[in-house]
Amino acid sequence: MPQLSRPARWTAALAASALGTFLIIGAVRADTTNLAANPGFESGTLSGWSCDSGTAKVVTSPVHSGSYALNATPSSADDAQCAQTVSVQPNSAYTLSAWVQGPYVYLGVTGSGNDSSTWTSSTGWTQLTTKFTTGASTGSVTIWIHGWYGQSAYEADDVALTGPAGTSPSPTPTSPTPTPTPTTTPPAGGNGSFTHPVYFMPLDNTPQSIGDIVSGSGENQFNLAFVLDSGGCTPAWDGDSAHTVAADTTVAADITAIRNAGGDAAVSFGGYNGTELGSSCGSVAALTAAYQAVITKYKLTRIDLDYENTALDSNTAARFGAIKALESANPGLKVSLTIPMTTVGFPDSGKDEIRQAIAAGARLDVINIMDFDTGLTGGTEVGQTETIANDAVAQLQSIYGWPAATAWSHLGLQIMNGHTDQPSELFTQDTFTALLGFAQQNHPAWFSYWSVNRDRACDPAVPHNWADGGCSSVPQSPWDFTKIIVRYTG
């Protein structure tokens, strides 16, 4: 956001059987029994597996071995996950593998205490393998396979989980961990019903009360900004050691009020100022723990990563390694990546961040573009904003191989009200209304803006900055801009 925001290795081939042929790669051990139920789908059914409703079936072609395989098709609202719970032994090593093909196929385990996952995007059969060690009290784990939102069908076959068998008589299927029930039917996109989350600083820039925002504008979806490092990899609001997340009660009360109003909140990490946790926490483990502390504190199902300034395209191995770990540990967690824009779409650093996320196996549900602060170089504000968004969609198509509609369904379109940090830019109420029409035609994952703190007229008796953090610097009534944003439904 702008300155004003404050922002030991061997290979053993198991004999072919009615369950398929398995190639297990792992530490030498006597535990070669496959613990997975119906691992090659040779029952001709999904027996033993629980899959997202309406997404999965057993097919006779293509198959990797045997007569059957899994075929599953994601939608814009789910990733076509199939999962099962398997009994295991504590303090034991396991290897999970599967043969898969298709775009963005993921294989992983949760509930082990040392969760792991892997992924591929392949037009031919490819084996995915990941290893994990169970914790001291682990008696069962959930193994899963899924694709990615809006992508075409994937196939999976010859799943294998090897290691010491647990004490339960047999594996039992499990339902994938559900995401929270939305208040409305989820629209197309990678973000469910969270379609117009406005940015709001709950402890800076003279914040209004949540009750006033909700009653005055109808808004109940918020990206709360910003959590930073206050020193020693300690999450704190605005990086202020006096407002650590661990000790917070103020923002917690705001989130409760938002949820009581039928809405939800994400927490945004980063911003233009201060030290983003990924810049200072060092290792993947330390950064994961810091982010997780915030997720746990506020029972979050959504987070936003606003890597700006020196944090942009920096320490990406740790950052996206942590995001991958968080997604494994928090099934259903939605992740948005916010990127500053140029007049020709993503900067090279932004495109590199997306590629680094893909390489790390970190899923990005929303790639949110800050479609402002580029300076108006010609034409109208509406025209330039639309051009930048269209350029970003084309770039996402190139990076991911998506069709345009899928790219739009993962794009967050964020603008700014009133005066921006660039004197050549001005977003009036009419600009917002015109861009709302543009959003309704193209269906981005969300239509948002920076920020609610500014959705009021400036007091003419008090000196204000060109782009003040607490007011819009244009004539308006309270909530004019938010009332336009909330009209977007996807």
Image: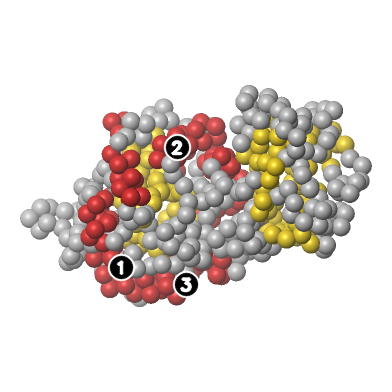
Residue tagged 1: 484
Q: Where residue 329 sits: x, y (%)?
A: 56, 39
Q: Where residue 134 sits: x, y (%)?
A: 66, 29
Q: Taking 20 as reference, is 393 left or right?
A: left
Tell me what residue is drawn at x 69 percent, y 59 percent: 56
Here the colouring is: secondary structure
What element does badge 1 sit on?
Answer: helix
Q: Taking 319 as reference, is 176 left or right?
A: right
Disc on the earlier residue, 1 or 2 = 2
Q: Taking 89 as reference, is 357 left or right?
A: left
Q: Which residue lies furthest to the left in this view?
A: 461
The answer to the question of whether label 2 and label 3 lie on touching residues, with beta carbons closer than 8 A, is: no
Name which residue type carries label 1: Ile
Name which residue type carries label 2: Thr
As measured in the structure, the alpha-carbon distance from the residue carrying label 1 to the one carrying label 3 is: 17 Å
Disc on the earlier residue, 2 or 3 = 2
- Depicted 54 relative to depicted 284: above or below: below
Residue tagged 2: 296
Q: Quadrant of the C terminus?
A: bottom left
Q: For mark 3, does the 10 Å Cα neighbourhood hold few (<14), some (14 to 19), or many (20 or more) residues?
A: some
- Tell me if I can see residue 378 in this picture: no
As measured in the structure, the alpha-carbon distance from the residue carrying label 1 to the one carrying label 2 is: 32 Å
Q: Where residue 155 sits: x, y (%)?
A: 74, 57
Tell me what residue is drawn at x 51 percent, y 51 percent: 179
Disc on the earlier residue, 1 or 3 = 3
